[in-house]
Image (tube, rainbow, N blue to C red):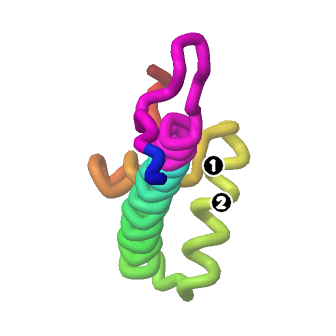
């Protein structure tokens, strides 16, 4: 004798399997999206820092390491992010602390 079972959960019963799985997939997607955004910002910051270091190398005849150290020292002296100092230099041509927002 074949049993024909109703695929719907009985009233009051819950079947959270697919819902829980979907929730986990969406959570993981959000985590991956955040990671991609972070890496994109890091790549952009790295490019900006490299351009700024190149400007300092050209302007002052510094090595790559010396130019980077100058950017780091400027960043530390003003308690600013290195990427902000580099962005300010590439935008204005001036090595100083970027204006505070």
Q: Is residue 97 visible?
A: no
Q: Percent x, y for residue 2?
A: 44, 52
Q: Residues within 10 Å of mark 1 (few under 14, many from 20)?
A: many
Left or right of 55: which side holds 38?
Answer: right
Q: Which residue is mark 1?
A: 75
Magenta stretch: residue 95 in it?
Answer: no
Q: Residue furthest left?
A: 91
Left or right of 70: which side holds 40?
Answer: left
User: Which mark, by number, is residue 56?
Assistant: none
Q: Quadrant of the C terminus?
A: top left
Near-viewer residue (68 or 56): 68
Q: Percent x, y for residue 29?
A: 45, 50
Near-viewer residue (42 or 59): 42
Q: Residue furthest top?
A: 12
Near-viewer residue (21 or 87): 21
Residue stretch in magenta: 4-27
Near-viewer residue (55 or 61): 55
Q: Percent x, y for residue 7?
A: 42, 37
From the viewer's perspective, is residue 36 above or below residue 59?
A: above
Residue drawn where x is 53% and y is 50% of the image: 28
Left or right of 31: which side holds 75?
Answer: right
Q: Label 1 near label 2: C-beta < 8 Å?
A: yes
Q: Which residue is mark 2?
A: 72
Residue drawn where x is 43% and y is 58% of the image: 36
Which quadrant of the view contains residue 77?
top right
Residue drawn where x is 43% and y is 50% of the image: 33
- Kind of element beneath mark 2: helix
Q: Residues within 10 Å of mark 2 (few under 14, many from 20)?
A: some
Magenta stretch: residue 22 in it?
Answer: yes
From the viewer's perspective, is residue 39 above or below residue 79?
A: below
- Kind of element beneath mark 1: helix
Q: Residue furthest front?
A: 1
């Amino acid at each position: 004798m074949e049993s024909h079972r109703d695929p719907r959960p009985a009233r009051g019963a819950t079947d959270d399997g697919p819902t829980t799985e979907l929730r986990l997939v969406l959570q993981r997607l959000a985590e991956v999206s955040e990671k991609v955004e972070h890496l994109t910002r890091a790549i952009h910051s790295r490019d900006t820092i490299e351009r700024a270091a190149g400007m300092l190398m050209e302007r002052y005849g510094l090595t790559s390491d010396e130019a980077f150290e100058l950017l780091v020292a400027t960043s530390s002296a003003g308690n600013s992010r290195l990427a902000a100092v580099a962005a300010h230099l590439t935008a204005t041509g001036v090595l100083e602390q970027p204006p505070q927002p």
